[in-house]
Amino acid sequence: MMLKIVKIASVLIVFMGMVSSQNDFKQTPGIKVISYNIWNGFDWGKDVERKTNFIDWVNVQKPDVFALPLEDVFHYSETSVE
C-alpha cells in the first residue's frame, strides 16, 4: 500500500513540475536571431527558386539579427548577397 502511495505521489510531483515548467517557456520580448549556413550559395547562384523561398521565409520570421557564417559568404560581394 505504501509503495502505491509513493508511486502516485511521484507521478503527481512530476506532472506538477511539467505543468509549472511550461510557463517558463513562454516567449518573452527579446532579440530574435537567425543563423543559417547557405552551404554553397544556393548552388553558386543557380538555384533561384531555393534562394527566393529562403528569402521569403526569413522575411516572414522577421529576425532582429540575421547571420551567415563567414566561411559561406567569403567568396561573395556585398551586392551578391542582398
Image (spheres, helix red, strand yellow):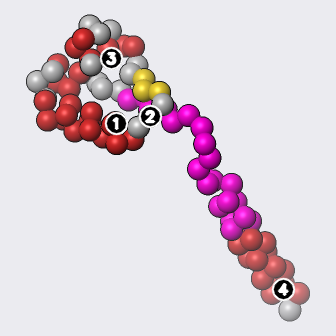
Secondary structure state at the residue bearing disc 3: helix
Horizontally, residue 10 falls left or right of residue 59, namely right
Residue neighbourhood size for the residue with mark 3, other residues' Cα within 10 Å, grouped as few (<14), some (14–19), many (≥20):
some
Horizontally, residue 69 falls left or right of residue 33, namely left
Secondary structure state at the residue bearing disc 1: helix
Q: Nearer the viewer, mark 2 or mark 3?
A: 2
Secondary structure state at the residue bearing disc 2: loop
Closer to the chain start, of discs 3 and 1, is: 1
Secondary structure state at the residue bearing disc 4: helix
Residue under numbered circle 1 = 58
Q: Decide: marks 4, 2 in contact (CB < 8 A)?
A: no
Disc 4/disc 3 C-alpha distance (Å) = 58 Å
Disc 3/disc 1 C-alpha distance (Å) = 17 Å
For the magenta stretch, what is the residue range?
17-36
Horizontally, residue 24 falls left or right of residue 2, namely left
**Nearer to the camera, 42 or 26:** 26
Q: Is residue 76 above or below residue 3?
A: above
Looking at numbered disc 1 in the image, what kind of residue is underneath it?
Val
Q: Decide: marks 2, 1 in contact (CB < 8 A)?
A: yes
Residue under numbered circle 4 = 5
Disc 2/disc 3 C-alpha distance (Å) = 20 Å
Q: Position of residue 31 (x, y in %)?
A: 56, 34
Closer to the chain start, of discs 4 and 2, is: 4
Residue neighbourhood size for the residue with mark 1, other residues' Cα within 10 Å, grouped as few (<14), some (14–19), many (≥20):
some
